[in-house]
Image (cartoon, rainbow, N blue to C red):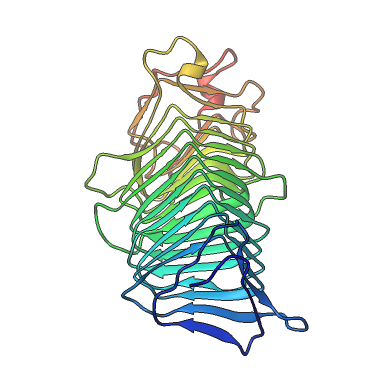
Amino acid sequence: VLNDNVRFYGDENNKIEINGPLTFVNNTNQSVQFNNKEGSDHFDGLYLNNQNLDYILDNVSFRNTGFHNSSMSLTIQGNSEFISCDTIQSDNGDVIISNSEFISCDIINCTNGSQLINNSQFLSSTQITSDGGNLTILNSEFTDCNLIKFYNEEVIISNNSFGKTGIYLENHSGDSESEVLINNNFFSNTDEPSVTAIELYGYPNFNLHDNSISSGYINGIVLSYCGIGSLEYQKVWNNFISGCAVAGIHNYSSNLIIQNNHIYNNMYGIRLHGTSSLALRGNPNAYFNTQTQEIHDNFCYEVYAAKNSFPAVFNYNVIQDEDNMGNPTDPIIYHATESATPDITHNIAHNCWGTNFSSESDLF
């Protein structure tokens, strides 16, 4: 049992190993602290070794200290803080992080259990890598974390704020029912573009909606080899994406529906590569531009499609760029066929093209 305001100090040659139960008593809101001792850069820290026990870290403070967890389940809560901790690792069981703060840390979760992060802050170059079971992130803030990497089977990321931070998700499970839900998140970056806001690789099912991505990212959303799933959703819809250095949405060899998004002021609106099966569609009942899919005022093409990636469904979109230069360098839609007279035609009649549209100069 550790009472409030207990303090531990050590260096890289010291560690505390717990093989039995451990209880933190939080009566006065003064945290139990683990710190590097004076003259040392790092305390090797706390090791929870019993794989058959559950541990709860309540109102604890780690500074320049490592933390290693192998328990059946771990909960970090109660305004706990981790500052300048170069190794925070959990390699077994379920992990719950709530109402806690991480500053300049390196967090690695490699577990077959579930992981839940709720109402927490990750700041100042904190790096996160998660591999294993299911992952849920809710109501949290990520600032100046560069790129967070997830290799989980089932993922939910909702109602979070990402500043100067992108997320990369790669599916390692091979399960055709693996699914990602990313919704109601806010992404912004005031630095030079260095990462993509949301990137998915190999997920058969995904539902990306109602996210706001503005300024300073290389791409807004990137999908590669996604959408070969058995569930209902392979969809990107109702996202606001602007200010990206390359593309608002970049798709490579994925199957999906792109619907009712608002994509503007990027270098390219949408780029479609590889071999894909997709629909690019808006709202047939819209009265105003804002009620349907808008792809407008991007610096180069609004839509670029490689030979085998032109949308099979292309309707009810607002596709506009009143100051584009036209063919051959700046059309609104560019289909990169290998022949000057391609043998495939596409129906793109039911779209809104703007007042200065000319099929001869704006379609290539």
Where residue 286 appears, x then y in whole percent?
42, 13
Q: Residue at x 25, y 58 (%)?
A: 175
In the figure, is residue 303 to the left or right of 346?
right
| Residue drawn at point x = 45 percent, y = 20 percent | 292
Q: Residue furthest top?
A: 287
Image check: 236 left or right of 147?
left
Q: 49 or 3: which is nearer to us?
A: 3
Locate residue 69: give its quadrant: bottom left
Task: Give whichever of 128, 223 is nearer the camera.
Answer: 128
- Residue farthest right in this picture: 39
Residue 59 visible in the picture: yes
Above or below: residue 308 compared with residue 350: below
Q: Position of residue 153 (x, y in %)?
A: 33, 58
Image vertical order of residue 114 relative to residue 3, above or below: above
Q: In the depicted view, which residue is nearer to us: 8 or 342? A: 8
Q: Inspect this view and state whether residue 195 appears.
A: no
Q: Position of residue 282 (x, y in %)?
A: 40, 23
Residue 188's x, y, as percent? 63, 42
Q: Is residue 113 above or below residue 356?
A: below
The number of numbered discs placed on residues in the rendered structure image is 0
**Residue at image coords 52%, 53%:** 167
Q: Residue furthest bottom?
A: 13
| Above or below for 106 versus 316 | below
